[in-house]
Amino acid sequence: MKFILSILLLFSAAVQAQSSTHSGAISVVESWNRASNTKDPYILSQLYADTLTYYGSRLTRSQCIRDKKRFFKKYPSFHQELDAMHIEAITPRLYRVSFDKTVRLTRNGSEKNYPSYLLIDLSSSPVRIVEEGDKVTDANLAKRKVKQTRKTAYSFNESYTISGRIVKVLHYGPPGYGDDPAHDQKLTAYVLKLDSPITVISNDGGDTLNETTTASEIQLVIHDFKKFKNLTRNHHRITLRGVFFSAHTGYHIRDLLMDVKSIEP
């Protein structure tokens, strides 16, 4: 009987703790909502963390408040209402509060609904908002990211021009490719170090050899060193044209390689 009573007491304490945590998170959301409707940047600044994710951007509290002030100045009749609040524990002290936010920008304007959320850190003192966003903005940012990736991405088996610095890299070859350094061949590979990483996307039809790869270094495959003698100059900046492919033998020491076709001016 005492054991059962102890279990019940522990369960009751856990429920009370969870209820208290939920109440703390909801209190922050309600304060944020009131401050937004009263256009009070001071209260909002007390609620935000020193840095937070604000509709997809990483901002300081000051940057966030400046944006709020600009928004309130542009829409002095702005008003929002919250409904269908849902609380989810990300960690024991980090909670995501989701809700439907109905927004009216002007006094006689139409209302729009945004599935929104706040991420609240209950471990800080005082409790702080570490992220503010909505699903509409998140979806638009994701679409923009996909478009940008497609725009800047490369494909296998197509010819491209790319620039970087040549670096000579020593590595082990056959028979062990590094498993037996005393007997393995010592080989030199030429690698193009890029200023920033690139992504090469596998063909839609399915390519069993090449896999979508992001890389900042490209191993160069050179068939005629007389033709490409400038490639032997270490740390020399150069522009090359060639075709990308993925590593698939022991001679390939980088995930991404280029079959060099020409040196560009």
Image (cartoon, rainbow, N blue to C red):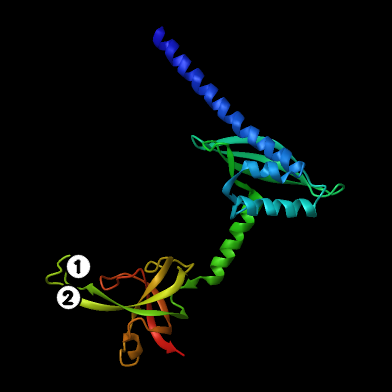
Identify which residue, 223 or 20, lies in the foreground. Answer: 20
Mark 1 falls on what kind of element? Answer: loop
Q: Is residue 138 left or right of residue 229?
A: right
Q: Is residue 109 left or right of residue 148?
A: right
Which disc, if any, is residue 47?
none
Counting from the top left corner in percent of width and height, residue 251 is at: 26, 73
Residue pictured at 65% horizontal, 32% vertical = 27
Counting from the top left corner in percent of width and height, residue 243 is at: 42, 79
Which residue position holds label 1? 178
Q: How many marks?
A: 2
Q: CA distance from mark 1 to mark 2?
A: 9 Å
Q: Quadrant of residue 145?
A: bottom right
Residue that lies at the very extreme toward the bottom in this rendered image: 226
Q: Is residue 256 left or right of residue 58?
A: left
Q: Quadrant of residue 177?
A: bottom left
Which residue position holds label 2? 185
Mark 2 falls on what kind of element? Answer: loop
Q: Is residue 85 above or below residue 65?
A: above
Instruction: Identify the amino acid type marked 2.
Output: Gln
Q: Quadrant of residue 226?
A: bottom left
